[in-house]
């Protein structure tokens, strides 16, 4: 099932304007700093070119501000590829052996297929640290921001 849909410029302007109104102007106790995030084509293609990748999920995240001396948290996006069923592209690998049962130091391993420890989790390409706007908004004034 496809995720997302195309919207008009007018709808996009309304939605981004609502965000700026609700999160950047009306919350003086914790105003939103970032109104947009940009990722390069190379990063997006690295995620999309993974075997089995059918889309990208964007998690909302926070990171410490990169401003010297600031303890503020800055909202950003973390991207990960998704498969046809919408699952994040994260693999569970069992390490050396047959890939199904890792017997490790299990002294009864000859009788039981109990794992000695949980298998390590590895992930496909995950992107973070987008180019934030403001500060890195590009040269043109977009009607969305």
Image (tube, rainbow, N blue to C red):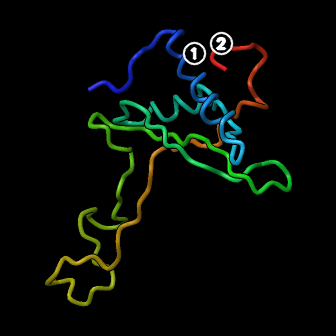
Q: Which is nearer the N-term, disc 2 or disc 1?
A: 1
Q: Residue at x 73, y 52 (%)?
A: 72
Which residue reaches farthest left? Answer: 111
Where, by quadrant of the figure, is residue 87 drawn?
Answer: top left
Q: Position of residue 108 (x, y in %)?
A: 20, 88
| CB under 8 Å between discs 2 and 1 | yes
User: In the figure, 42 relative to 64: above or below?
Assistant: above
Side (left or right) of 53 relative to 108: right
- For image coordinates 38% across by 44% down, the residue present is 89
Q: Is residue 93 left or right of residue 77?
A: left
Q: Nearer the viewer, residue 142 or 98?
A: 142
Q: What number is the disc on residue 13?
A: 1
Q: Residue 109 in the image: state x and y as whole percent.
A: 21, 83
Disc number at residue 107?
A: none
Q: CA distance from mark 2 to mark 1?
A: 7 Å
Quadrant assignment, res 4: top left
Please say if 135 is above or below 30: above
Image: 81 above or below 63: above
Closer-to-camera residue (17/130): 17
Numbered mark located on residue 143 in the image: 2
């Amino acid at each position: 099932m496809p995720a997302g849909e195309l919207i008009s410029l007018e709808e996009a302007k309304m939605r981004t304007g609502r965000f700026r109104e609700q999160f950047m102007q009306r919350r003086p106790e914790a105003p939103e700093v970032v109104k947009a995030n940009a990722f390069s084509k190379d990063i997006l293609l690295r995620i999309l070119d993974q075997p089995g990748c059918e889309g990208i999920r964007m998690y909302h995240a926070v990171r410490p501000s990169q401003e010297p001396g600031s303890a503020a948290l800055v909202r950003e996006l973390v991207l990960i590829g998704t498969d046809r069923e919408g699952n994040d592209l994260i693999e569970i690998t069992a390490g050396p052996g047959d890939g199904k049962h890792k017997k490790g130091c299990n002294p009864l391993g000859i009788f039981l297929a109990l794992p000695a420890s949980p298998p390590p989790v590895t992930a496909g390409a995950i992107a973070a640290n987008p180019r934030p706007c403001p500060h890195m908004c590009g040269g043109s004034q977009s009607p969305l921001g």
